[in-house]
Amino acid sequence: MNELMEILKSLHPDVDFENEQHLIDDKILDSMDIVRLVTELTDKFDIKIKAKDIIPDNFNSAAAISALIDRINEE
Amino acid sequence: MHNNVIDYLNNIVRIKPDKTAYSDGTVALTFSDVYELSGSIGTYIANRGIYKKPIVVFMSKSPMEVATFLGVVSAGCFYVPIDEEMPADRIKLILDNVRTPLIICDRVTASKASDLQQSGTDVILYDNIVADTKRDDAVLKEIHDKAIDIDPIYIVFTSGSTGVPKGVVACHRSVIDYIEQLSEILDFNEDTVFGNQSPLYFDACLKELYPTLKFGATDYLIPKQLFSMPYKLIEYLNEHRINTICWVVSALTMVSAFSTFDDIKPEYLHTIAFGSEVFPIKQFRIWKETLPNATFTNLYGPTEGTGMCCYYRVNRDFADDEPIPIGKPFDNREILLIKDDDTLADKGEEGEICIRATSVTLGYYNDPERTAAVFTQNPLNKAYPEIIYRTGDIGKYNDKGELIYISRKDYQIKHMGHRVELGEIEADVDAMDVIKMAACIYDNDKKLIILYYIGDIEPRELDGRLKEKLPRYMLPGRTYKLESMPFTGNGKIDRVTLKKMYLGEA
């Protein structure tokens, strides 16, 4: 979670990622952010995020992203 | 003989009135709808006595926005698209420049639009215009009969190095020439189904908007959110049987980089054009292998040359580090590679890419100084007035005779498909009272804008404040506070050292 927070903060230092629940729906993260985020997650966590997983539900909050990473690791 | 883009509409509405022209997947307008709606907007503007004036269109990306553009043009005026995602500061600079008598907005942008209202400017809702004004053929015909092909059609704003955006004014003649040439190169026809990616406030959207009218094709304005959801994006292409896309490279690589094609493939796509950035060859190969029968065309061109002016149909494999050429000019354009001493570059020599063509735009609106700096007399012609546009891009011909893009002459960069002057970002940061000095560099590998500054503000707070000032694509990806700025011998900020610091080498 700390590593994830670091990546998110580097995208937008001014966003309250601990509490924000609508990162995609409220357009806080746009398409460029998603591309960068997925690229950095892939590198940092050594996981493969499938195109099918890149949907708003998996990226609306830090908790959702963290859950996605856990789920991919379990598979 | 077409001398006005409205001729395309007047022609196609007779042939295919009931076919869908523009759709966003939810709302669709037929050619007949577009004709009536644009006609009522044109009539409204004409009845107000507004003629040959810039009209600001401040609407959400939608088929109705396209109809509004055409309405403005049919009134003999020219449209200035602005967007809800532009920061208020930038919109204000644009409004200060164009001094429009009228802003047309929709329900989404209405409150922002009234905040921006200046004296002498009216704000009106699109819905109210089309509900209250019927198309008046006689009024519009009278305007159309007076039109000539060097009348402006739009102003779109690009980044400027002083922090003030430049409004590029294009005329009918340039747009028609561009549409005719591009359609031939990419083989557009009445069966073309476009999937538009570009925002409507850039000239990039000309590629779809006007060929749709020329051929009676259909243009889907793809919702922006889909460009961060690759699987859903391809689903959308298939659902609407989209067969032709002209996208920025970053949109294409987003799809290929996430292995989207392992799960879903575009079923109808046969024509793919890309541009504005260098296509990484590894990503290109993924596309090519997925769609071996599709054509892939690299396009190159500055806004000042009306859309694109050079193309390269990819017909061979490339080494990983080899750039895809920008090829050769469209018909009716000449590319001059001009060296610093105003002579032509020899074979294999580098020179500034300069354009001589009817597609060279009219210049920057209300800005004679910056116009004169780059729209210049052809230095090879001393006999009569002939304007060329100097792009500031450096190019050369390879041994196959194909034009290759080398780099920017100054430090303007291509970032996420947008042209960005790092100097404009610096100027905006420098303008803040807490900032003593700012400098930007670009990380071309990670595609990040890096901002260094000295000032009494923490990076986190500075990033927050920059969001108010700069469009999203101009925001720094990394922001670092410095105690002192490195300088070169002659007192300029030393960007080479900054780059080394960034890479951890200094």
Image (cartoon, coloured by chain):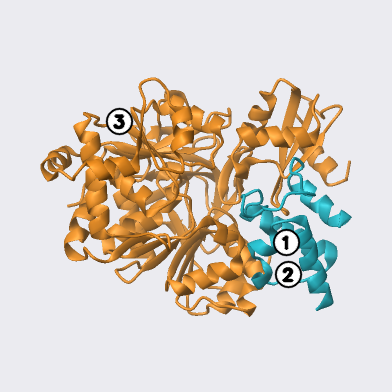
Chain colours: A cyan, B orange
Q: Position of residue A23 (x, y in %)?
A: 68, 52
Determine whether B91 is above or below B204 in the image: above
Q: Which residue is mark 1?
A: A38
Q: Residue furthest left?
A: B138
Element type at marker 1? helix
Mark 2: secondary structure: loop
Q: Are marks 1 and 3 in contact (CB under 8 Å)?
A: no
> Disc 2, disc 3: CB below 8 Å?
no
Q: Nearer the viewer, mark 2 or mark 3?
A: 2
Q: Nearer the viewer, residue B423 or A74?
A: A74
Residues flagged by tags 2 and 3 on a common chain: no
In the rendered image, residues at marks 1 and 2 fall on the same chain: yes
In the depicted structure, whether residue B352 falls above or below residue B88: below
Tags 1 and 2 touching, CB below 8 Å: yes
Measure the alpha-carbon separation of dots 1 and 2.
7 Å
Of residues B409 and A31, the one nearer the viewer is A31
Question: In the image, what residue type sits under mark 1?
Answer: Val
Residue B327, position as x, y percentages in the image: 49, 59
Q: Earlier in the sequence, mark 1 or mark 2?
A: 1
Q: Which residue is mark 3?
A: B53
- Compare residues B457 and B298 and report the one nearer the observer: B457
Q: Quadrant of residue B173?
A: top left
Looking at the picture, which amino acid does disc 3 mark? Lys
Query: Can you say which quadrant of the picture contains the C terminus of chain B?
Result: top right
The relative height of residue A75 versus residue B220 in the rendered view (above or below) is: below
Q: Which residue is located at x 51 percent, y 75 percent? A: B266
Residue topped by disc 2? A49
